[in-house]
């Protein structure tokens, strides 16, 4: 029996943070055991907002190295860089030509990111979900792990595959593109900003104290946790809507310490913020220490990382080119008959 296929990725828009790890990469580590797993560093997506060309390469390498350091095993999955596979951009163009503009204008993430950029909004930002659809459909992924924030984009990929492509260019009995399903992560953790419990932790937040990155030193982690927003109450509790910061920090503590929610509730309901914060900082530091050791070792050996990305790209290239050819044939393109 063939394993089902899963595809996912993170944008190299900055140092990966606790949210990227706990909400995404940590789950992929389990998925790779059960599914044929492809994970890419989505660098083409990273330029849909203004970016610094001096940092893109380093962010791409550090993201790939962090995948491995967090437990993605190149023997069990394929790790590659999106821009190394030209089929992604090519399919994006083809899908652009069959995707209605009004579908794109409804995308919540576009509206949210566009507001922040005023007059600087690029067509690429509007097109972000079509590129994501191209990523997924090229690999004929059965499942895509998604958090709440990406559900709308996956729905768009499904609609493009089914309503705009298969039904127009395929045959009902033999659809050309697989329509991917969302893989809802059981304990999908949405990690919120350290400065505002109602906003998600994000790489692009201009306030660096809002996030803990996987490469922060222990001293920096202690400093950021010390500065994290608190409230006036004594004792910490989960799930109180008027105390989003307490809920967020307790959830982080429970995951990184490996303690059950009930145990954490019991431990923290009778202590104040002053006592809790050092416990949380220690738990975060110990949980990411093994990741940092593995990361530093890998970055000392550029050849090894190169090899991992080259192997990943070979597998990705084979699969994606085969899908692209089928799509181009269905579109009716004149196929190259000369060398
Ligand atoms: N705060 C978060 N909590 C849980 N999961 C999160 N993810 C991101 N932030 C959190 C998950 O990480 C994966 C990759 O995210 P991405 O970098 O491709 O895009 P993003 O969701 O836009 O992440 P950022 O950090 O907010 O990046 P910027 O600031 O560049 O836009 C996704 O699976 C996402 O759910």
Image (tube, rainbow, N blue to C red):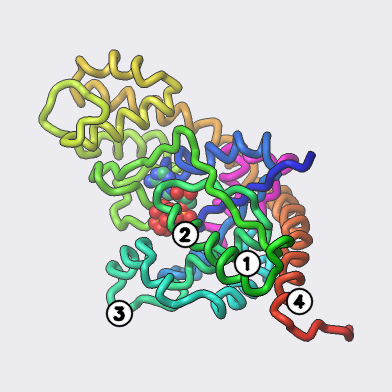
List the residue tagged with mark 3: 119
Between 133 and 181, the residue placed more toward the observer is 181
Residues shaded magenta: 57-80
Q: Are marks 2 and 1 in contact (CB under 8 Å)?
A: no
Please give the name of the residue rendered at 51% of the width and 74% of the height, measured from the top-left corner: 99
- Give the alpha-carbon distance from disc 2 to disc 4, as whole Å: 26 Å
Residue 252, above or below 60: above
List the residue tagged with mark 4: 329
Residue 241 at what x, y percent from top left? 20, 36
Residue 230 at what x, y percent from top left? 18, 35
Please give the name of the residue rendered at 75% of the width and 62% of the height, measured from the top-left corner: 317
Between 99 and 231, the residue placed more toward the observer is 99
**First in sequence: mark 2 or mark 1?**
1
Q: Is disc 3 placed on a helix, strand or loop?
A: helix
**First in sequence: mark 2 or mark 4?**
2
Q: Is disc 1 placed on a helix, strand or loop?
A: helix
* Quarter of the figure that contains the N terminus: top right
**First in sequence: mark 3 or mark 2?**
3
Magenta stretch containing residue 103, yes or no? no
């Amino acid at each position: 029996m063939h394993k089902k296929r899963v595809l996912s990725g993170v944008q190299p828009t900055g140092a990966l943070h606790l949210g990227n790890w706990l909400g995404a990469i940590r789950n992929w580590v389990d998925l790779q055991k059960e599914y044929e797993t492809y994970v890419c560093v989505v660098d083409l997506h990273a330029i849909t907002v203004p970016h610094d060309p001096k940092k893109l390469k380093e962010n791409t390498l550090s993201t790939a190295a962090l995948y491995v350091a967090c437990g993605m095993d190149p023997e069990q999955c394929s790790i590659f860089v999106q821009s190394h596979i030209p089929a992604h951009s090519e399919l994006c163009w083809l899908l652009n030509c069959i995707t209605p503009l009004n579908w794109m204008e409804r995308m919540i993430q576009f509206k949210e990111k566009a507001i922040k950029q005023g007059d600087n909004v690029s067509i690429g930002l509007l097109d972000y979900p079509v590129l994501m659809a191209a990523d997924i459909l090229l690999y004929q992924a059965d499942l895509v792990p998604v958090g709440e924030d990406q559900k709308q984009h996956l729905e768009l990929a499904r609609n493009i595959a089914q309503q705009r492509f298969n039904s127009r260019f395929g045959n009902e009995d033999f659809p050309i593109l697989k329509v991917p399903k969302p893989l809802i992560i059981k304990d999908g953790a949405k990690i919120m900003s350290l400065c505002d419990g109602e906003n998600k932790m994000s790489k692009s937040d201009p306030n660096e104290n809002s996030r803990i990155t996987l490469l922060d030193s222990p001293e920096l982690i202690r400093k950021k946790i010390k500065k994290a927003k608190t409230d006036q109450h004594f004792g910490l509790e989960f799930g109180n809507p008027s105390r989003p910061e307490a809920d967020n920090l307790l959830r982080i503590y429970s995951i990184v310490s490996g303690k059950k929610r009930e145990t954490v509730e019991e431990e923290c309901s009778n202590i104040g913020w002053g006592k809790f914060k050092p416990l949380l900082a220690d738990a975060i530091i110990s949980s990411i220490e093994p990741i940092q050791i593995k990361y530093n070792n890998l970055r000392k050996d550029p050849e090894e990382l190169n090899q991992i990305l080259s192997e990943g790209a070979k597998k990705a290239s084979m699969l994606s080119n085969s899908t692209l050819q089928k799509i181009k044939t269905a579109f009716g393109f004149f196929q190259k008959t000369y060398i």
